[in-house]
Image: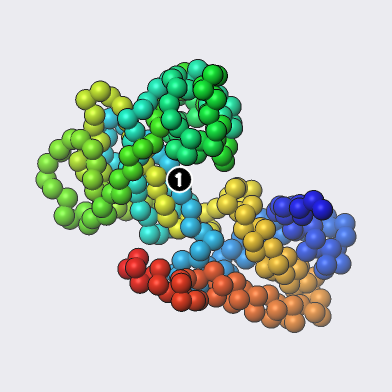
Amino acid sequence: MAAPTVPTLSTLVSEALKKAGQSNPDSALTTRAEDLWMNEIKNDILVLAGGRKLKALYTSAVTITVNGKSRYSCPTDYFADMTIDLLDGTTRGIATGGAVGSITLASNVDVVGSKILIRGGTGVGSMSECTAFDTSTLVATVSPNFATAPVSGSTYTIVDIITRLNEKHRSHRPNNSNRGNPSDFYPLGDADYGEFELYPVSYTTDGHVFGLLMNYYANLMTLDLAGTLMSTLYQRWRNVWLQGVYAKALDELHDAKANEQMAIYKFMLQELVARETYGMDMSNLQARIMDY
């Protein structure tokens, strides 16, 4: 039997409106459900969570350093608790070809099981793990796919050096501009998503750059409704999205069942937050004690 089709924003809204008796909703109602009610549900989840971090929102992003630059922007969906790993490697090269699921390396290396980081050119910032390597063609197969396919001329690093940076308060930053391999990062506030500063300033004499792997909790309200993480949440929280749109549609239509279905929706929200919050069992509790 084939796996169920992954729900999308469109299919969720369509199914919920059908439950509310709207088999052929007009475009205004569909747009209202997709643009307003789905964002209201996201906000309802966050309000009920009360600032607690939900496991499903833990994610990561990669950026590439610039020689001589110390200040970088946080990911646009950043919410809280970021850790940063400095990525480097002794094997670097220029690809002679590539695709979303592979890259043709410049030399024969022992790469299976290692992360391959695209550090320059097309696909910069993409990173994936090598699962197979053809020593005759030098094609390294990766999984999952690169976010953007590398091409001939893209530069890469085989990641074999991973250093966890120390998070420190901005007031403790030394008053100098030492250069080298960063060991610390200092979170900074700004007008949008936040920034951080590396110390020492990222710099190498041969000009090669590092990768920065940022692990953090995403801000549910800033997630693109059609983005990758939201696609996962549509599947993981499917019943909540359906019930939320269904209840809000009944309320919009002044249906007598609206209050009853809204109460069910709120109960489902409480269950979701309880399930997705750390500390619900002894293994999670142990993890939290070790983290803090």
| Picture coordinates of residue 40, whole percent (x, y) | 61, 64
The answer to which of 269 and 30 lies nearer the viewer is 269
Tell me which residue sits at (58%, 69%) in the image: 44
Q: Residues within 10 Å of mark 1 (few under 14, many from 20)?
A: some
Instruction: Kindly indicate the quadrant of the structure image that contains residue 22.
Output: bottom right
**Quarter of the C terminus within the rendering:** bottom left
Q: Secondary structure at mark 1?
A: strand
What's the residue type where badge 1 is placed? Answer: Ala
Tell me which residue sits at (34%, 46%) in the image: 85
The answer to which of 201 and 110 lies nearer the viewer is 110
Instruction: Kindly indicate the quadrant of the structure image that contains residue 266.
Output: bottom right
How many tags in the picture? 1
| Picture coordinates of residue 86, whole percent (x, y) | 32, 42
Which residue matches tag 1? 61
Tell me which residue sits at (45%, 22%) in the image: 108
Tell me which residue sits at (17%, 55%) in the image: 171
| Picture coordinates of residue 163, whole percent (x, y) | 30, 45
The answer to which of 262 and 138 lies nearer the viewer is 138
Instruction: Kindly indicate the quadrant of the structure image that contains residue 144.
Output: top right
The answer to which of 30 and 69 lies nearer the viewer is 69
* Side of 202 where 258 appears, left or right: right
* Side of 168 where 249 appears, left or right: right
